[in-house]
Image (cartoon, rainbow, N blue to C red):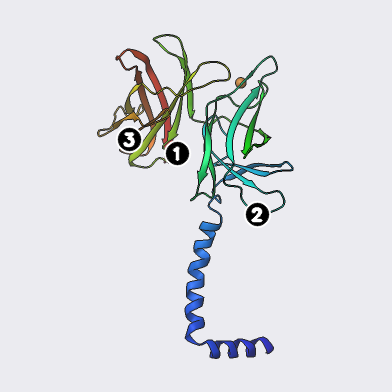
Amino acid sequence: MFFNKINLRVAMAAGLLLLMSACSKDEDDDKQVNSNNPLSEYVLLGEESTANASVRLYASEDAFVGYNEIAVQVFQPGTDNQLRAVSIQLLPMMDMGMMKHSAPFENPTYNESLSAFSGSCTFIMPSGQMGSWTLAVLLDNEGVRDTLTFPIIVVPKAEARLISFESELDSSKIFVALRAPMGPEIGANSFELMIYERETMMAFPPVENLSVEITPEMPTMGHGSPNNVNPIHMENGHYVGEVNFTMSGYWKVHFMLKDSSGQMVKSDGYFDITFQ
Ligand SMILES: [Cu+2]
């Protein structure tokens, strides 16, 4: 009764204003869900702190063999204040006992809409008996340096998102990651490959001079599809095109890589993509 009376008085006093603010408050709440936590679709891989910084490491899904979108938030320790001016470098490392190796990555830069630093890491093997992964985040905050190291479990995907092979031209070791489509649909889908070369066990620079030709096929039905767009190099080893899936089911997207003088680098690459 007491609360009802209070509510009545407030409602009468505030009248329409209250109703209006109630309506707009709902909209605000909806927006806040998105703007307060743009990482809500991401998975927290770990949280580590030093005396100078607390770091939250996210990925767009559980770490897998392939191109992983990585997000990093850096906080003043014990606060919610993000440090946005730091510079961040990544260092993935797989410890295989007898040897260690790194993986391709893109250092994160601050992304306002994500409210986090955003970069990538392409894990090239699964975690397991062969070895274990860490992803180190190296911070430089105006000369104050910190390294925070996160253990990462890397799982293989049922349909490979990364393939590796030796160049048919010069035997260099090439890695091709399928970045898109992540959620394929009937019709035109963005088709993006990331292509890297293994220079040393610690250096995997992007390969930027290739031409890519894609040919989708439905092996079980004996047909392909029209209106595909061969991926072309954008920057840093990102090749972007379009694949047209005329129906759902199992597709095999063949690709061919040639160097800038038209010599074959890979004649029989493919990714399996199944969706319902
Ligand atoms: Cu390994």
Sequence-first tag of 2 and 1: 2
Q: Which three-letter amino acid code belongs to the residue tagged 1?
A: Met
Q: Which residue is drawn at 63% across and 53% down?
A: 81
Q: Which residue is drawn at 70% across and 17% down?
A: 97
Residue under circle 2?
80
User: Which element type, helix, strand or loop, lies under badge 3?
Assistant: strand
Whether 135 is drawn above or below 200: the answer is: below
Q: How crowded is mark 1: few (under 14 residues within 10 Å), some or many (20 or more)?
A: few
Q: Residue furthest right?
A: 51
Marks 3 and 2: in contact by CB < 8 Å? no
Mark 2 and 1 residues: CB-CB less than 8 Å, in contact?
Answer: no
- Between the residue at mark 3 and the residue at mark 1, the CA separation in whole angstroms equals 13 Å
Give the camera-side residue of 83 and 62.
83
Q: Residue 242, labelled with which disc? A: 3
Judging depth in this view, the residue of 203 and 252 nearest the camera is: 203
Instruction: Answer whether residue 69 is visible to the viewer in this image.
Output: no
> Mark 2: which secondary structure?
loop
Q: Quadrant of residue 217?
A: top left
Residue on which disc 1 sits: 182
Coordinates of residue 6 in the picture (x, y in percent): 64, 88
Quarter of the image for residue 130 reads: top right
Above or below: residue 229 compared with residue 117 = above
Image quadrant of ligand 1?
top right
Which numbered disc, 2 or 3, marks the residue that appears first in the sequence?
2
Q: Position of residue 209 (x, y in %)?
A: 36, 21
Q: Which amino acid does label 2 sit on?
A: Asp
Q: Residue furthest top?
A: 170
> Separation of disc 2 and disc 1 at Cα?
32 Å
The one nearer the camera, 189 or 90, is 90
